[in-house]
Amino acid sequence: MLPTFKRIFAVSALVAVSLAGAAGSFAQDFLSANDLKPAKITVPTEFEGFRILAKSDKDVTVEAIDPVRTAADGEVFNVRIKLNGSGAADYRAIGFTAKEKAKIVVYLNSSSKTDARVLKLTGSGGAVIAELSAPPDDGVKAGIATFEIPVAGDYLIFSAGSGINVYQILIE
């Protein structure tokens, strides 16, 4: 029989592993601009497992916004990630890893007040998986775009042309 201290430690470790496993089955991975500090990003930067890809001449901006944007599901955003123009595999893009087939929800707007913009989702090889619309920014509402990720892997989202503002990305 183990001494009391070792038994307590072993039971505590077993409970922690069990809780982590249970939490993992219900967990979502997400990146919320609301959790980021305003900044001009000029090099690839990681936040909570998401990668914001930028270069000195193709930067991404994180900035506070007023008025706030509210999505149809009630999510409220007071910070945005400005992609600042067209993106590619190594700049003005946000990368993430899906651990399995998943639904991706992106809260976003075009940086234009009048024109919708195209958000691309690509796989690690560069193949376009989906193209969705980023609605014009009316100064009040945040749009919502959803994608289905077919398999586990690395993915990127970026604008096909001109700026898009991203408020949050959920991997469900």
Image: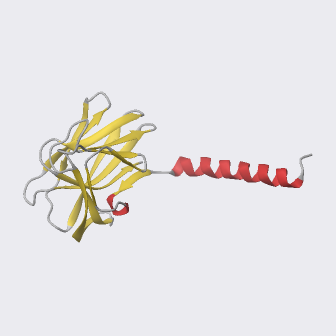
What residue lies at 15% left-to-right and 51% top-to-bottom? 163
Q: Image height check: is 116 above or below 53?
A: below
**Which quarter of the figure has residue 36?**
bottom left
Q: Position of residue 114 (x, y in %)?
A: 7, 58
**Image height check: is 61 above or below 131?**
below
Residue 150, above or below 107: above
Q: Is residue 101 left or right of residue 81?
A: right
Pinpoint residue 25: horizontal percent, then vertical percent: 54, 47
Frontmost residue, 151 versus 162: 162
Q: Position of residue 119 (x, y in %)?
A: 20, 44
Residue 67, image x, y percentages:
21, 72
Which residue ends up furthest to the front in the rendered image?
A: 56
* Foreground pick, 91 / 155: 91
Residue farthest toward the left in the current orientation of the protein: 114
Q: Which of these two is toward me, 72 or 6?
A: 6
How many numbered discs sit on the rendered protein?
Answer: 0
Point out the residue furthest to the bottom here. Answer: 67
Q: Quadrant of residue 81?
A: bottom left
Is 18 left or right of 94, judged from the image as shown? Answer: right
The residue that appears at 14% across and 48% down in the rendered structure is 117
Chosen colour scheme: secondary structure
Image: 73 above or below 172: below
